[in-house]
Amino acid sequence: DAGVIQSPRHEVTEMGQEVTLRCKPISGHNSLFWYRQTMMRGLELLIYFNNNVPIDDSGMPEDRFSAKMPNASFSTLKIQPSEPRDSAVYFCASSSGGSQETQYFGPGTRLLVL
Amino acid sequence: SQQGEEDPQALSIQEGENATMNCSYKTSINNLQWYRQNSGRGLVHLILIRSNEREKHSGRLRVTLDTSKKSSSLLITASRAADTASYFCATNSGGYQKVTFGTGTKLQVIP
């Protein structure tokens, strides 16, 4: 299996621009998670989906952030408008559910907002 | 604050020595997991221990869980330079697969 795929791997944008991060989970996994990692705040769960349905979005910082999962093989995290404080590494992870609940992480998208 | 708090925040040891990291948490859990993150990479799952288990082994890794103290420890025996990474504990609680990560321990193994 190719593992969790994220794109782009790096993104540099200017404040105010829209940013879209993409994730393809492992085939057959029914849960998908978006995380943000910074030096100051560590690893934060932003939102997670189960069977394409958002279950908990309490970690989404504010209305500028939105996430979608139109089907089992694709999810997006959008920031509009972006701000410098959004600079971070954004990880997507997926899991197959059941009793194991192990999450498999993608390589991350390193976002820099100037 | 984070559900899981790792201790110490940073640890530096010589190759061949054992490394012990601790994790404390606040609420009841279904299971606890340990992950490793190499610099610039995503997290990699190491081991999962359920709330009704007290100890688990995987290769050079040994994990213990004390639910009465709400704490867990990760022991890496005979450390190698390649073990240099950050290690996170993650607790799972509730009916959904919500996992809450701790703050991490940064381990440096000196060759």
Image (cartoon, rainbow, N blue to C red):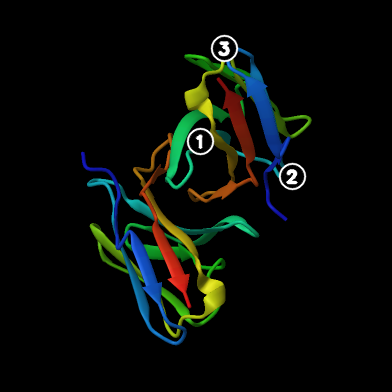
Q: Earlier in the sequence, mark 3 or mark 2?
A: 2
Say whether residue B111 is left or right of residue A82.
Answer: right
**Which residue does the numbered mark 1 point to in the structure image?**
B36
Q: Quadrant of residue A96?
A: top left
Q: Is residue B107 visible?
A: yes
Q: Which mark is residue B95?
A: none
- Mark 3 vs mark 2: give the one in front: 3
Say whether residue B58 is left or right of residue A32.
Answer: right
How many angstroms separate mark 2 from mark 1 (CA)? 22 Å
| Rendered location of residue A99, percent (x, y) | 43, 35
- Circle 2 packing at 10 Å, graded few (<14), some (14-19), many (20+), is some
- What residue do we see at 58% from left, 39% from top? B88
**Which residue does the numbered mark 2 point to in the structure image?**
B26
| Rendered location of residue B104, percent (x, y) | 63, 42
- Circle 3 packing at 10 Å, graded few (<14), some (14-19), many (20+), is some
Q: Are marks 2 and 1 in contact (CB under 8 Å)?
A: no
Residue most toward the front? B111
Q: Which mark is residue B78?
A: 3
Q: Amino acid at mark 3?
A: Ala
- What residue do we see at 25% from left, 62% from top? A74
Label 1 element class = strand
Q: Amino acid at mark 1?
A: Arg
Label 3 element class = loop
Q: Are marks 3 and 2 in contact (CB under 8 Å)?
A: no
How many angstroms separate mark 3 from mark 2 (CA)? 31 Å
Say whether residue B90 is left or right of residue A17.
Answer: right
What chain does badge 1 belong to?
B
Label 2 element class = loop
- What residue do we see at 43% from left, 34% from top? A100
The quarter of the picture where the N terminus of chain B appears is bottom right
